[in-house]
């Protein structure tokens, strides 16, 4: 029936994602994300180890401001290319390999550890619908926080081991970042306004277990405030830049889950999978590893 086939559009899942996209546009369209990135990296020093750690920390911070792993990669890649040119290292160098592997790997991970990307937003929505359990933004963030910290340290040490630098101390990076900040000029009103709106939104997300306002409503509300005349920081034309196909994808994925349940196709699939797994599920470690790889 129509109600089942398009049920995903009548849930908060796609609209949470739509609000998250508008939320991220506040940081990218105003230039706030690039300024935050330059301000952080200029403080980490000139050693290869510190620069690599700075990029991982930046990836985590940008996930909070720009809820899209793809957008984070774009922002960080442009900065990384400029830094590599300033350092005098480029194609084929271990420093370049380490930077780009780090920024792509961590951006793809952190938007799962924070309710930011389509996978985490969709996963939260499906858990709430099928298990009838409320999941707050703050709960998800705190539950993943230990893993986020382990990922930061592990990625840093592993990449340092896999890609030893041609030169441990690098020169020219600070000058490049200082020039970038000089070109940006002083903080603009739009950047300050965007920073205020974003910090207010994150504060509401972090305290949603107290006020019980849905994180989807907070995200969508922040996105709409961002495009309101005088109150917002985005022009209405910015909505035309939003990738609505990604929103439709999240909605149809939710719809497909409902279709699978109503047609009992999910029961058939589950029986086949569990029939294969059942003989292997012995002991607590296998009960984690077997379903994960399945």
Image (cartoon, rainbow, N blue to C red):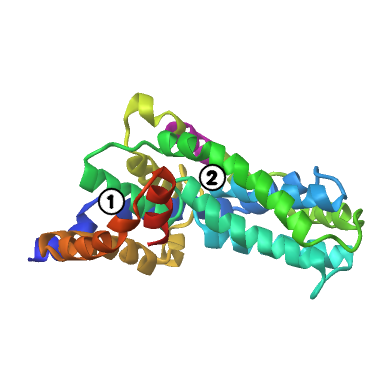
Give how far across and how far down residue 226 sits, in percent.
45, 47
Q: Of the numbered discs in the image, which one, if any, rests on residue 126?
A: 1
User: Does residue 153 appear left or right of residue 91 in this picture?
Assistant: left
Give the overall secondary structure of the magenta segment.
helix
Front label number (2 vs 1): 1
Q: Of the numbered discs in the image, which one, if any, rests on residue 64?
A: 2
Which secondary structure, mark 2?
helix
Give how far across and how far down residue 167 sits, in percent.
91, 60
Looking at marks 2 and 1 on the same chain, the residue that comes earlier in the sequence is marked by 2
91 and 278: which one is in front?
Answer: 278
Residue 100 figure quarter: bottom right
Question: In this picture, which residue range is highlighted in magenta?
Answer: 197-205
User: Does residue 129 appear left or right of residue 91 in this picture?
Assistant: left
User: Does residue 178 appear left or right of residue 187 in this picture?
Assistant: right
Give how far across and how far down residue 254 sits, in percent.
26, 59
Q: How far apart are marks 2 and 1 (CA)?
A: 22 Å
Does residue 273 show up?
yes
Vertical arrangement, residue 138 with respect to residue 189, above or below: above
Residue 78 figure quarter: bottom right
Q: Of the numbered discs in the image, which one, if any, rests on residue 270?
A: none
Q: Residue furthest left?
A: 1
Identify the residue at image location x=39%, y=56%: 290
Give how far across and how far down residue 45 sits, in percent.
85, 45
Q: Quadrant of the C terminus?
A: bottom left
Q: How many marks?
A: 2
Does residue 26 show up?
no
């Amino acid at each position: 029936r129509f109600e089942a086939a398009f049920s995903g559009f009548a849930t908060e899942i796609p609209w949470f994602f739509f609000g998250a996209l508008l939320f991220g546009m506040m940081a990218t369209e105003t230039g706030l994300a690039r300024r935050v990135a330059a301000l952080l990296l200029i403080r980490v020093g000139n050693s290869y180890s510190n620069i690599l750690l700075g990029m991982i920390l930046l990836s985590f911070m940008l996930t909070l401001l720009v809820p899209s792993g793809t957008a984070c990669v774009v922002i960080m890649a442009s900065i990384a290319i400029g830094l590599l040119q300033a350092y005098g290292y480029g194609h084929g160098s271990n420093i370049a390999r380490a930077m780009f592997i780090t920024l792509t790997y961590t951006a793809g991970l952190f938007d799962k550890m924070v309710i930011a990307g389509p996978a985490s937003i969709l996963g939260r929505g499906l858990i709430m619908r099928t298990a009838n359990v409320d999941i707050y933004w703050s709960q998800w963030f705190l539950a993943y926080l230990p893993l986020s910290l382990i990922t930061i340290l592990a990625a840093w040490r592993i990449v340092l081991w896999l890609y030893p630098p041609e030169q441990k101390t690098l020169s020219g990076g600070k000058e490049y970042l200082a020039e970038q900040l000089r070109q940006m000029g002083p903080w603009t009103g739009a950047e300050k306004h965007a920073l205020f709106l974003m910090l207010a939104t994150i504060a509401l997300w972090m305290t949603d277990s107290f006020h019980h306002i849905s994180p989807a409503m907070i995200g969508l509300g922040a996105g709409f405030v961002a495009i309101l005349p005088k109150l917002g920081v985005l022009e209405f034309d910015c909505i035309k830049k939003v990738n609505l196909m990604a929103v439709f994808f999240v909605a149809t994925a939710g719809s497909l889950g409902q279709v699978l349940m109503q047609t009992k196709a999910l029961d058939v699939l589950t029986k086949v999978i569990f029939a294969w797994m059942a003989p292997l599920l012995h002991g607590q470690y296998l009960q984690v590893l077997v379903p994960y790889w399945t």
